[in-house]
Image (cartoon, rainbow, N blue to C red):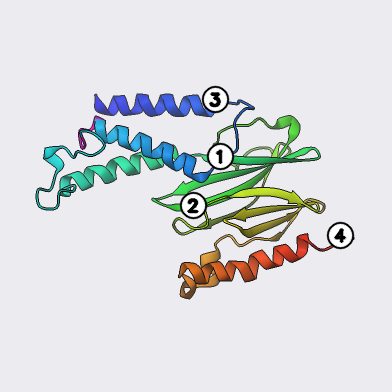
Amino acid sequence: MKYVKNILVLGYLFGFINTANSQDIKPRSCHYYLQEANKLEFQELLDAQVILDSVTIAPAYLDSATKYLNKEGSEKYLEIKMQILSNYFNDYLYLQHVIHKENVYVLFFSLAGFDDMSWDIVKFTKENYQVHERFRDFNGVDEKSFKHILSNYDEGPKNDENVRIFIINNYLVMERENLYHSLYDLTSSTVLVNEESPWHAASPANYDEKELDEWIRINLHEKINEIINKKRD
């Protein structure tokens, strides 16, 4: 019965969201979706009686020594968390869009595993675009309607604040936490600067957050900044 209830709840949630096509969806942050997933997770923990409220662990799942979840409770929590993450983040999630001439450029966010974050830019024709909170797949669809432009990701939460795209000097820029990460030339329809995985490109030696940000600043941000501020021919 519980399994059926979960399926009904998730089916209703995703069925409703996937058919929504309101043009009134406002720009959103990555953390908006993470918070929504947390709400679902909290409700599932209540329904499974792992917790009794926001501060009380059910006696059956309470470690009396540590006052935290015991082994069974931890396993149940991980099971619920993975179920929520795999269902809620099964789609690409809308963050923002900008319009340039006859095209719409949309920034999407997605999550893999517990916390690997990725961002994708997709180009649609204006006549074929409607604002959807969720987008299922970029593959196997007529590229006359849309085209996947670029993507990049991070191993774990990294530069996920103030993620946005904007147009300047006929260039499309992706900025994450005040660092330019990607540059697309709208005139030639060409990706000029982008690193799919900055961490891998910088090498594991630069896993330290400050060192990685410095690598991004030198190898991505400064290159992009120079190009967008140069007078075009």
| Label whose residue precedes the other's in the sequence (4 or 1) | 1
Measured in 3D between alpha carbons, the distance from the residue under mark 3 to the one under mark 2, in whole angstroms, is: 24 Å
**Location of residue 78 in the rendering, given as x and y in whole percent from the top left corner:** 28, 46
Residue drawn 51% across the image and 45% down it: 30
Q: Which residue is mark 2?
A: 117
Q: Is residue 194 above or below residue 146?
A: below
Disc 3 + disc 2, Cβ < 8 Å: no
Residue drawn 68% across the image and 67% down it: 222
Q: Which residue is mark 4?
A: 232
| Label whose residue precedes the other's in the sequence (2 or 1) | 1
Q: Is residue 53 above or below residue 82?
A: above
| Label whose residue precedes the other's in the sequence (4 or 3) | 3
Given residues 28 and 135, the one toward you in this image is 28
Q: Is residue 52 left or right of residue 91?
A: left
| Label whose residue precedes the other's in the sequence (2 or 4) | 2
What is the crowding at mark 1: few (fewer than 14 residues within 10 Å), some, or many (at least 20)? some
Furthest-front residue in view?
A: 55
What is the crowding at mark 2: few (fewer than 14 residues within 10 Å), some, or many (at least 20)? many
| Label whose residue precedes the other's in the sequence (3 or 1) | 3
Viewer-side label of 2, 4? 4
**Location of residue 140 in the rendering, given as x and y in whole percent from the top left corner:** 61, 40
Viewer-side label of 2, 1? 1
**Location of residue 25 in the rendering, given as x and y in whole percent from the top left corner:** 59, 31
**Location of residue 3 in the rendering, given as x and y in whole percent from the top left corner:** 28, 29
Highlighted range, magenta: 47-51
* Quadrant in which the C terminus appears: bottom right
Q: Which element is circle 3 on? A: helix
Report the amino acid beneath label 2: Met
Q: Is residue 216 above or below residue 183?
A: below
Residue 106 tag number: none
